Amino acid sequence: MTCAWAPWETGPIPAPLASGPVLEVNLQAIVDNHRTLRRRFTGTAVTAVIKSDAYGLGAQPVAQALAKAGCGTFWVNDLIEALALRPAVPKATIYALQGLGVDAVEGFRAAGVIPVLAGLAEVERAAEAARHAGAALPVAIQLDTGLGRLGLPAGEVERLIAAPELTDGLDIRCWVSHLAAFDRPEDPLNDRQRALFEAWTARLPPAALSLAASACVFRGPGWHFDLARAGSAHFGVQTSARWQPGLTAAYRLTAPVLRIVELPAGRTVGYRGVGRLVRPTRVATIDLGYANGLPPAVTRGGAARIGTHAVPFVGGASMSLTMLDVTDLPEGLVQVGTRCVVFDTDAPIEPVADRLGVAPNALLTQIAGTTPKLYRATTGPVVPDRCQPDRAATAAAVSS
């Protein structure tokens, strides 16, 4: 369920969304984060990873906001996601990160989607289809420099270098790789992967180079190459042990109070009496639970916010209900219908994710994928992605 866009700074939650939990998505913050990335990036263009429905935040509205701000290239998981995205950004370049999969090669051509080929077998399959069609097929090719997930490993890269005719019929737009330790800038594995990426691509046919994900944009120019594939940073999510300045959280999770009750000291609350009240307690039950992607472990030692006051969770979380201790709040501040804030710019997901031992994006996608969203509109002029003058040919290939 979504609602019409409204100004982020003011707008109340409109009906019928106001009756339940809502994840507000600040499209202006996403655009501002994109501009922050562009200011730091020394390559050709900052492109946007909006796979898995833009990490649950909504691929179509996010892409439209970024396209308005001048972002012309997007990365999704597969052809299905690309087909769903295409109507929202008809002129954009769209890459499918997971390769051909079981889809027909011509399906990518028909949709104007560029597959990121995941192995030598896919390279050969795509080249054969292109030769059969008598028309070059735009592709990117992923190189496995150390992550071990998708991409050509060393042996397949050497075969491709030794037999360049294997790519006959392919219009190679980009060589792609991904750092296994992107979140740990000091890890020597990063340097080994970068060196291998540079050595391989120096012997392969010329094309744009893409190694940098969000965290690499905040490193030196030596990590940038031609295209940045930024996902998390667009949403204001920190993905590195080294702080990434200038990013704003683009999400706000709130839920209304359904009931307030006074309970005596010694009373247990929650399933199996998981919480025991040590004092007479005023308990507010809110409309939020694990069905909205909130891990029950968040409630152990965690807190939400009502107004400017932190209020601790009590009694664990159920499927759609969670309880808060509001005993210490000023009289009249909380009542049925009052919205409490669980995550926003002042209460970001990273500390909670760290406490739970999960990646911040695991928490974001879990919540965003299951909670009704309200989109807050963007403002400001369109600012096209700049291109380095000495990389005009690469920029033209990327934007075509």
Image: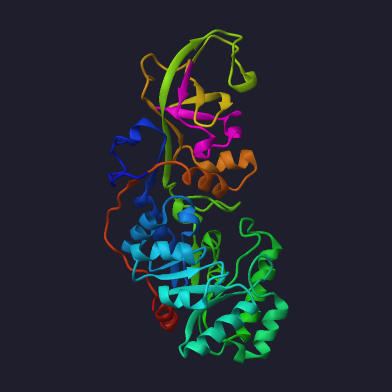
x then y, percent, for residue 43? 47, 72
Question: Taking the image as drawn, is residue 31 in sight?
Answer: no
Q: Give the residue drawn at x 37%, y 20%.
A: 336
Quadrant assignment, res 65? bottom left
Q: Nearer the viewer, residue 234 or 52?
A: 52
- Horizontal placement of 69 versus 177: left or right? left
Q: Nearer the viewer, residue 225 or 137?
A: 137
x then y, percent, for residue 50? 46, 59
In magenta segment, residue 291: yes
* Segment tinted magenta in the rendering: 283-308
Q: Give the residue drawn at x 61%, y 22%.
A: 271
x then y, percent, for residue 183? 61, 56
Q: Nearer the viewer, residue 155 or 212?
A: 155
Q: Nearer the viewer, residue 38 or 59?
A: 59
Question: Taking the image as drawn, is residue 95 in sight?
Answer: yes
x then y, percent, for residue 135? 45, 88
Q: Give the residue drawn at x 58%, y 26%.
A: 316
